[in-house]
Image (cartoon, coloured by chain):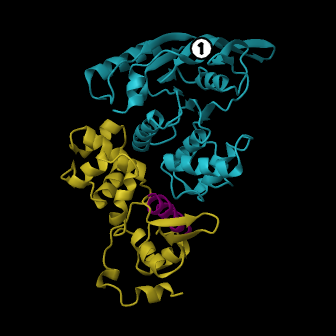
Chain colours: A cyan, B yellow
Amino acid sequence: MTDAKSQAMQSASLTPIITVDKVSLDFTKEKELMPVLVEVSLVAPKDQFVMITGPSGCGKSTLLRIIAGLTPASSGVVKFREEPVTKPRNEIAMVFQNFVLLPWKTSLENVMFGLLARKDLTDQEKLARATQALDDAGLRGFETVYPGELSGGMKQRVGVARALALAPQVLLMDEPFSSLDDLTAENLRREIYSLLISSSSPIQSVIMVSHNVEEIIELADKVVVLSARPARVVGELKIDLPRPRDKKSKEFFDWVDRVYALLA
Amino acid sequence: MPDTAEIFKGGSEDRFSHRPMMPANVRAGQVIGLVEVTGGLGSKIDASQLADELGEDIAVLLPILEAAELLGLVVTNKGEVTLTEFGHKFQKTLKNKVRLLRDKLAEIEPFRTALVIASHRRDVNTEDIVEELETEGIRWHHQRDINYSLVQALLIHWALYSGMLTYDGRTGKFKRAA
């Protein structure tokens, strides 16, 4: 990576864009309180790629939904800059693991669907944004194709385009490559990372959930490791490997080992 | 509007000869990933080692390798996979790299037939293309409905991605791209 934004990511200023402060979540099952998240705190600074990992079912995706304002926390607070996040906001967009596309709508209509609630945009502006987002996601020519006619990688590109069309400052991604085969994921990961850090991107911070440790070391500036349920933060690592990262290097494997050690 | 028999009447002598066919379930992302990984491992690698690196079964990797070879991106010799000069150029291209494959795809079925029919008509649907291919004994599956789905998926994925054809999902029609 050579552009200015990627260099900015490497020497990131630490202005917090998202702050998660002592967030806990409990469920009640048969009158018994079941803690899911216990006082989880993390900061996603400006121009940083933050990855959250932890054992399966520990609540990583739930934490992301709380950050997105989709699920209320039992206690604690999530802030976007200085403002509490209590409901979904235009500045925060999310890419889901299983694409979540409407099968009866075309790719373009799916992307525009995310803009429906935007009263500040005219229909023409929504169309222009959605078309541009599809183009940016590598799907020029697929505007009138339905999700059922797309491959898994392309469905996820529509999911990414839907998030990009919102021109968010924060992008949340919930295991976006986990439903794809390894080769498709490898390609899409590179493309999406380049897209997110490009100078034309409005995105200032990315928080991504993943259980793929190599993917984490390839992408992250910072890794937050959660314990098994109830999830607590058991470690936070700042990964300062130069980019692009050499997945064959000893340093890369050392970082992989450090994350595994925390997960174990 | 000419029918497909008329379009192909008096066509090239290779009409009934062996034609390269795109493996049915291979997608561009997999081929791009293969080229990236091969390039990242020093441009030359044993196919079984490549499968190990990717954590994929060799049976999954082989059709992807076949597609990459058809597209002129790699050559395989006695199990060794090597990036071609075109493969290196492809690897270094950052955006819309599948568009580089447009000319190569035009020589591979079902894209070749789709392109020929679309060049003679205003638009064409998958059924026309499948029928023409079947007259030439070219099919990806013996069951007609499955064969239709496989051809449709190949066309939508590769021909649109490469900018060879346009497609309207609401009408199911393909057109030759400008």
Q: Is residue A48 left or right of residue A255?
A: right
Q: Tell me residue A261's x, y (percent).
A: 41, 13
Q: Is residue A17 above or below residue B133?
A: above
> Residue flagged by tag 1: what amino acid is it?
Ala
**Nearer to the camera, A164 or A252:** A164
Residue A162's image quarter?
top right
Q: Quarter of the image containing the N terminus of chain A?
A: top left
Prevailing SS of the magenta stretch:
helix
At horizontal 55% and vertical 32% (from top left) the residue drawn is A173
Q: Secondary structure at mark 1?
A: loop
Position of A182 with respect to A160 (left or right) is left
Residue closest to the eye, A39 or B120: B120
Q: Residue at x 50, y 16 (%)?
A: A225
In the image, residue A98 above or below residue B177: above
Quarter of the figure that contains the C terminus of chain A: top left
Percent coordinates x, y for residue B100 in the rendering: 34, 58
Q: Is A41 part of what is drawn in magenta?
A: no
The chain holding disc 1 is A
**Front-most of residues A160 and A48:** A48
Residue B135 vertical placement versus A52 (above, below): below
Dot 1, crowdedness within 10 Å: few (<14), some or many (≥20)?
many
Please provide the residue range marked out in magenta: B145-161
Q: Is residue A67 visible?
A: yes
> Residue shown at 37%/33% (left/top)?
A3
Say which residue label 1 marks. A231
